Amino acid sequence: MSEFCRVLDGGVVLRRAETPAEYFACQEAQRKAWGITEDGYVIPVATMVGANLHGGLVLGAFQEDGSAVAMSFAFLGKVEGRLCLYSQLTGVVPGKQSLGLGREVKLLQRDFARAEGIPVIAWAFDPLQSGNARFNLAKLGARVRKYVDDMYGPRTDALNAGVPTDRVIAEWEVEEDLKPIADPGGAPSLIAVRDGRPEAVAAPAGDRLWLPIPRDAAALRKTDHQAAEAWRKAVRQAMTSAFAAGYEAAGFVRDDENRCGYILQPRSDD
């Protein structure tokens, strides 16, 4: 059994992939998780094996029949000059996405990073996906300091087709318990909504800034593509400007008071 392993409910075992069949199972889980129909978007087995044997980590959540209901692919990299475990992707197959598998993957990645002396785990995510943002910042305590315009270029999978693949980079310190900011208070907003359309605005310097996003960007893209694009452009401008000014996203709020957005503060390492 793999050194890094978690036994989950229903006979699912989350651990390192070890055999060709398990790598193929991870490929199939990737296809299902993203609705991929083109093999060019699937990570080759040789790439996964090479990373897994040389400092990286390929995880699968394997069922008793050998199939995988989740997978993760990570390799060694650097973020701002520091060694990191870069988690390229984590996917959970449809029907299994409410079981906490994403969290279990991150916790096992942290165990691995700690054992290997790797100080930080980094990964990219769509800044308009409020569920991911809340999990990454409010639950895990990751920070966001970098915005990448159209990081992957055009994609054809179900989640990204027809949308520029703007991403932000999450940085998660594995030895520090960074507490996320839970309340924006009266922080000035980096986005103003005028005539139903968002616009990035210059905000005064302060200890806290507020950056709202749509509560459900995926639904908005289906019902009002122009509005969704306006939000993407406004968030891109606001985040890029704030990060250049020395801020980081250090919290996320999505609550019953109709608040949904990032809380920014001056970078903790400045």
Image (cartoon, helix red, strand yellow):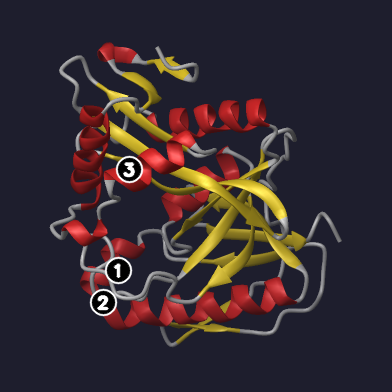
Category of crowding for the residue at label 1, using alpha-carbon neighbours closer than 10 angstroms: few (below 14), some (14–19), many (at least 20)? some
Q: Residue furthest right?
A: 270
Mark 2 lies on residue: 224
Q: Amino acid at mark 3?
A: Gly
**Labels 1 & 2 near each other (Cβ < 8 A):** yes
- Does residue 30 lie above or below 222 as drawn? above
Category of crowding for the residue at label 3, using alpha-carbon neighbours closer than 10 angstroms: few (below 14), some (14–19), many (at least 20)? many
Category of crowding for the residue at label 2, using alpha-carbon neighbours closer than 10 angstroms: few (below 14), some (14–19), many (at least 20)? few
- Does residue 117 lie above or below 250 as drawn? above
Q: Amino acid at mark 2?
A: Asp
- Does residue 215 lie above or below 20 as drawn? below
Q: Is residue 31 left or right of residue 227?
A: left
Which comes before the other along the chain, label 1 or label 3? 3
Q: Mark 3 and mark 2: span between their CA atoms?
A: 27 Å
- Helix or strand or loop: what does disc 3 sit on? strand
Q: Residue at x 75, y 35 (%)?
A: 176
Q: Which mark is residue 220?
A: 1
Residue 264 in which image quadrant: bottom right
Q: Is residue 106 left or right of residue 71?
A: right
